[in-house]
Amino acid sequence: MNKESYVKAVAKRLTCSKARQAEFVRDLESDIAAALSAGETWEQVESRMGDPRQVAQEFNEDLSEAERAAGKKRKRTKTIAIVATVAVAVAAIIGAAAWWAAPKYVAVGQASGHTEQEVLQQAELVVELFNSGDAEALSSLCDGTLGPLVNDELFDSVRAVFGGGDWGAFESFGNGYVGEFVYMGKTSNPVELVAVYENKTITFILAFNKDMELTGIQVK
C-alpha cells in the first residue's frame, strides 16, 4: 500500500465530523512527510504506524460523544445521498410515469426482509469473487439479465479502465452504505462499498433484488 492509499484507508474508517476527519488527515500526512524527510522509507513508516484499521480504531475510541454523533450524522447524510442518486437515475428513466410507478424509499429490510449487514456481506462476497477472478461464481450470484454478461473479459476491462489495470493486491474493505427502495412492486438494495487495494482505492456500486441476486454493478 502506498502512502496515499494508506491515508485514505484510515480516513474512510474515522467516525467523526468531516472537519475533524480533515484535521486528522492533515496531521497524518504531516507526520508521514516529516518521517520521510528524516530519512525513513515509506515501508518503515507504514510498519511503525501499523494497520490503518487499528490507527482509525484507536482514534475513534478517543472521540467525544459530540464527535461520534457528528460522525453518525455524516454517515446518514451520505447514505441519503446514495439513495438520492439512485432516485435521480430512476426518475430519468421513468420520466412522466404515474405516481404509483415512482420508487418508494423505505428503511433497509422493510420490503426486502434483509438486514443491512446481510446485504453488505453479499456485497463483500461479490467484490471477493471479482478479486479472485472467478467469473463463473460471480455470474451465479447475478440475475438472469446480468449473469450472462459477467466473464473474464469484463473483469479485465474494468481493471484496465479504472486504475490502468494495476490495482495491486486487495487489502481491506472501507465504508459500506446500503439503501432500499421499491419500484413497481420490485425491491432493490443499492450498495456503495469501498475496497482498498495496494495501489488504488475503488468504490463498487452494486444493486441487489429481493432474492439477493446481483442486478447491477458499477466501479468508480
Image (tube, rainbow, N blue to C red):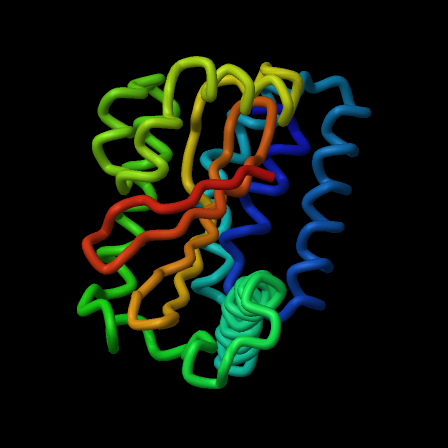
Seen from this angle, which residue lies furthest bottom? 99
Q: Percent x, y for residue 133?
A: 35, 17
Residue beneath the point at 48% across and 62% down: 60
Horizontally, residue 164 falls left or right of residue 174, namely: right
Q: Percent x, y for residue 92?
A: 62, 64
The answer to whether residue 63 of the structure is visible from this angle is no
Vertical arrangement, residue 178 with respect to residue 136, above or below? below
Vertical arrangement, residue 99 with respect to residue 187, above or below? below
Q: Percent x, y for residue 112?
A: 23, 67
In front here: 100 or 106?
Answer: 100
The C terminus appears in which quarter of the rendering?
Answer: top right
Residue beneath the point at 30% across and 66% down: 186
The answer to whether residue 83 of the structure is visible from this angle is yes
Residue beneath the point at 32% across and 52% down: 208
Horizontally, residue 122 falls left or right of residue 174, namely: left
The N terminus appears in which quarter of the rendering?
Answer: top right
In front here: 15 or 143?
Answer: 143
Q: Percent x, y for residue 25?
A: 69, 50
**Quadrant in which residue 137 is drawn:** top left
Vertical arrangement, residue 220 with respect to residue 56, above or below? above
